[in-house]
Amino acid sequence: MGTLERYITEPLKEVGWRMTQWTEKYIPDAWIIAVMLTLVTLLLAWIWGSPPGKPWWGLDGLYHVIIAWGNGFWILLTFAMQMTLIMLLGYILAVSPPVAKFMDWLSRKPNPEKPWQSILLMGLWSNITGWINWGLSISSSAMFMTYIARHQPKVDFRLLVATAYLGLGTTWHSGLSGSAPLLVATPNNFLIQTGVLKEVIPITRTILSPFNLILVSVIIILTALVMAAMTPRPERAYKMTPEILERLKRWEPPQRPQIMTTAEKLSWWPGWNIIIFLMGLTWLVDNFAKKGFAGLTLDVVNFIFLMLGIIFHYRPVSFLKAAAEGARFVWGIIIQFPFYAGIFGMINYTSLAQTLTNFFIAISTPQTYLLIVYWYSGILNYLVPSGGSKWVIESPYILKAGFTHGISDASIVMAYAWGDMATDMIQPFWAIPLLGVSGLEFREIMGYLMVLFIIYSVVLTIAMLIMPINL
């Protein structure tokens, strides 16, 4: 065993394994976490958010907090639908025939005798698709992994699966489907409705800001190279087996019947898809001609992916089959978001928001505030592994505290975005679809991800200290 493996890689794998064991044993289902956070926030708001002149222990204060919870419960219906569509449409596009053919072609390009090339390719794919759309990254990386596994038999399978998970922990929230940046760019979003923000923040100040684009480019290349560098020696590689290859089944489009009824012919006619795509393309050209990059909002991103999914599947029956299968993965978002909206209500509609704002002001300076937001968001993300729902919880007080320090809203949003996804790579929640396809347990890939997490955290800590406070 080499020095690097003995003193660095192996100890980190042990830590990663134990952390995953702890997570699997003690961290409950995501909805249970939402309920637990609801009760914690209820207690905090009861103590620090009671009406003026009323003792915190009185039932009047408890009643006031519960009413605030109910008033906020349904405020995120639009946002929840947007998040649901991001995941669903990403899946639909990932399994479309053109994307599948491209993945099959691309997976044959690395040299089979140099497994590190396959890992590098997988890392670049996961990172780039993550920046484009997190739903696309989850689905397409799981599929691309199956193509690489079949065409590159000498690649280490555990490292391949770990690398396929990169986009969710390194790039997605800094990209075109980032929940917080796209939400604040959406007209009349809930932060504007509740007075937290005065106006929209265009993505030219967040996702497309020069600082963010440079940082994304560095992270995409660096993290893919780090994973490739961890490729084990051939005798230690976790080789493909017939059992593994049997598990790696791909999505199959529906088979066209020889004899069809009139209804079936209508379902197979591509004209419906072509007409809708041309209508959508016309609207998109008009939207961007009038607004430029400022026209890119959550709704527009989803519209683009819907149109691409429709035309890439070409026939309605294929598109609808992919939609029906993709719908299995979105139920968690649908059922959890109202509870996070209720938490937002207890924070924003009581004086708890001001209490939390004062706390963040007290523990920070203008020079350290973005770094504090980054690490706070990353730590909280381990318990609330949803960037959109967690933004609902944090935004009222981290924005207000940042304004007090003279930090721009765009800088705070991006510090949150980078922090939010920082711990995704050591949190098994979003890896579930990938693990389901691969048949591995999270502890089997945790060691590799822990090594990457440490390197990534050092780079991002430095980045937060030099990030401009007026993006």
Image (cartoon, rainbow, N blue to C red):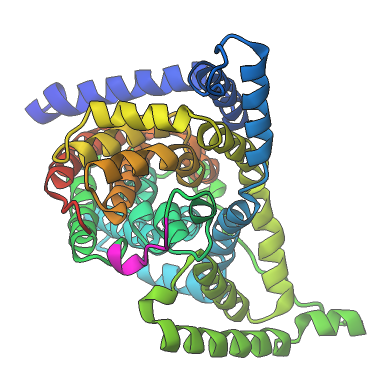
**Residue 162, image x, y percentages:** 36, 42
In terms of secondary structure, what is the magenta stretch mainly?
loop
Report the residue at 85% width, 79% height from top. 264
Please tell me whether residue 196 belongs to the stretch shown in magenta: no
Magenta residue span: 198-205
Q: Residue furthest right?
A: 261
Report the residue at 56% width, 73% height from top. 303
Q: Is residue 447 visible?
A: no
In the depicted view, which residue is nearer to us: 71 or 175?
71
**Residue 71, image x, y percentages:** 67, 39
- The quarter of the picture where the C terminus appears is bottom left
Residue 170, placed above or below residue 220: above
**Residue 252, image x, y percentages:** 64, 64
- The quarter of the picture where the N terminus appears is top left
Side of 384 where 17 appears, left or right: left
Residue 413, placed above or below residue 63: below
Side of 297 where 330 appears, left or right: right
Q: Is residue 364 visible?
A: yes
Question: How many marks on residues?
Answer: 0
In the depicted view, which residue is nearer to us: 246 or 123?
123
Residue 148, placed above or below residue 45: below
Q: Quadrant of residue 7?
A: top left
**Residue 22, image x, y percentages:** 43, 17
Please tell me whether residue 203 belongs to the stretch shown in magenta: yes
Q: Residue furthest front?
A: 53
Report the residue at 48% width, 88% height from top. 285
Q: Residue furthest left?
A: 3
Q: Quadrant of residue 468?
A: bottom left
Side of 62 where 52 appears, left or right: left
